[in-house]
Amino acid sequence: MKPYRDFSDFLHDHFRSKMQKLTVNAGFTCPNRDGTKGYGGCTYCNNQSFNPDYCSTGLSVAEQLEKGKAFFRRKYPEMRYIAYFQAYTNTHEKDIERLMTLYHEATEVEGVDGIIIGTRPDCMPGKLLERLKELPWVMVEYGAETSHNDTLERVNRCHTWEETVDAVLRTHEAGIPCGLHLIMGLPGETVEMMMETIDRVNELPIDTVKVHQLQLVRGTKMAKDVEERRYDIPRFTAEEYAEICVRIVERLRKDIAIERFVSQSPPELLIYPRWNLKNYQFTQLLNNKLDNSRD
């Protein structure tokens, strides 16, 4: 028996077929980039570090999805798909009709059975939540990152934990599955602070969490700040971070699915950590530790 519920378990509850997420870049920005709430974006963020090659704003949503399908179809011809609106803040648009047009465009692509919308907790108006019910299947993933407001301010998120709580509660009340994105190792945070975030997540009606280590990426303000020694960041070995993940698994509410524990930026962009482990290798390391902790 697995020591935690994973994302495939969650998807199995909603779909009959094996599902693959296809990332979409719909050309949005963020309120902490365009001056709505601030400038510069999150200090750790370089969107080039997680966008696949087929995600180009020069292509329509449907074209991006077709390219993504072509990549996976060669190996998994029976695969079905979920369009993942990932880059930046995918509800940061006053024109709700434009948003719905983009979302519907995705679900009208052959083989795409639903969408996941990545956004911020301060960018989900009630009117949009109501309109999302028109879609065949939709999930909202909020970038919470941490429950500590001092940290959120330090990394220029320009929203609060209280706004995360509010957005999650409203999304749950609308009957829409909801996930949270969390970053472990943000500047100024101890391991105990990270565990406090997990405790606060447990109090919310969420379906999934996506956890990963902080990555120091070239071209970000955080990389510049660390280089200029304005502050430093926690620097965990793979073993140390795996131990943190063991504590997360042991602490997280058992009905919440864990989508992932690590993220992998391109080597040419990544400064830290350089563990030289593939994601599956880290997961094996973690599972071994979980097995040992149950002996």
Image (tube, grey):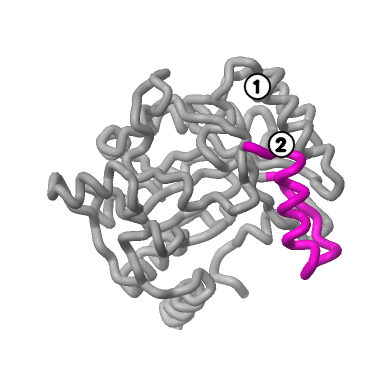
The mark found on residue 60 in the picture is: 2
In-front residue for pair 23/2: 23
Q: Amino acid at mark 1?
A: Leu
For this orientation, the residue located farthest to the left is: 229
Quadrant location of the N terminus?
bottom right
In-front residue for pair 206/97: 97
Left of 275 or right of it: where is 57?
right
**Boundaries of the magenta span:** 58-83
Q: Nearer the viewer, mark 1 or mark 2?
A: 2
Q: Is residue 173 visible?
A: yes
| Residue highlighted by disc 1 | 128
Left of 169 or right of it: where is 215?
left
Indicate the secondary structure of the residue bearing disc 2. Answer: loop
Q: Between disc 1 and disc 2, whose residue precedes? A: 2
Residue at 79% of width from left, 27% of height from top? 134
- Image height check: is 196 above or below 100? below
In-front residue for pair 124/287: 124
